Amino acid sequence: MPIIRHEQLPIAGELGVWQIQETEEWLLRQLVLYPQELRQLDAIKGRRRVEWLAVRQLVHVMSGREQRGAFVKDAFGKPHLEHTNWHISISHSHEWAAAIAAPVPCGIDIQFIVPKITRLAHRFLSKEELSCVCEPHALDMLHFFWGAKEAIYKAYGRKQLDFIQHIHITPFNWVSPKGQAKGKVIIAQEAPLWFDLYYERSPNGYMLVWALAQDNPLS
């Protein structure tokens, strides 16, 4: 199935979602992979090869280019699309791939919702954040918190961040199936960096979260 969602974001940027139904062989026929990408693909095994290829096909379709631009990484390992100063972020989970591109730092995460996250919540949430999680939406909220912190981590992209110590989600009113929140990165002796967060819980059991920096402090 081709791209099922491609839209302009309200502030700035683009969001895309792809339902992965294609084979590895089909995706390889569509994509022109560069030498560095071929080396990366060689190190990937199993189903993740298809996910890796699909998210690159998604970004290419979103770009509107005739010739595909390579994924290149900056000095911190953060990816961007060749020959553009826009930031990009990608994510994939099972049969879904998601991508975001924006003129400010951005991050995206998509996760299939599974109960086991409840056993791991203490590893990525502060006591204050845990206190915000409530029934009947606890499972969805935990996936939002994880996705929000993952998206902010990708958007920041410069240092190793501890999900509890450095990434903080501010209290907000949970609205289902989609809503907004805010988060920030706090590093000692640095001014906080704020991010707008958006989430959507799909009917087929996925949580999609993306983050957009409120300005461009990392440029």
Image: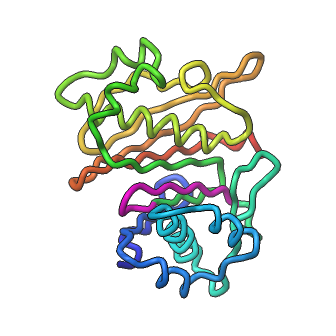
The percent coordinates of residue 166 (x first, y second) are: 61, 23
Seen at 51% across and 60% down, the residue is: 99
Please identify the quarter of the rendering in which residue 142 is found. Answer: top left
93 falls in the magenta region: yes
Rendered view: 195 above or below 104:
above
217 falls in the magenta region: no
Along the viewing direction, whichever of 134 and 205 lies nearer the viewer: 205
Seen at 44% across and 40% down, the residue is: 147
Secondary structure mainly formed by the magenta segment: strand
Rendered view: 56 above or below 136:
below
Q: Is residue 71 left or right of residue 126?
A: right
The percent coordinates of residue 11 (x first, y second) are: 52, 52
Total count of labels = 0
Seen at 49% across and 70% down, the residue is: 54
Please identify the quarter of the rendering in which residue 114 is found. Answer: top left
Q: In this view, does 200 lie to the left or right of 184?
A: left
Along the viewing direction, whichever of 84 and 45 lies nearer the viewer: 45
Q: Is residue 182 left or right of residue 72?
A: left
Seen at 77% across and 16% down, the residue is: 189
The percent coordinates of residue 64 (x first, y second) are: 57, 79
- The residue sitting at the right extreme is 75
Image quadrant in which the N terminus is located: bottom left
| Image: magenta residue range | 86-97
Q: Is residue 23 left or right of residue 163?
A: left
The percent coordinates of residue 209 (x first, y second) are: 43, 45
Scheme of colours in the image = rainbow
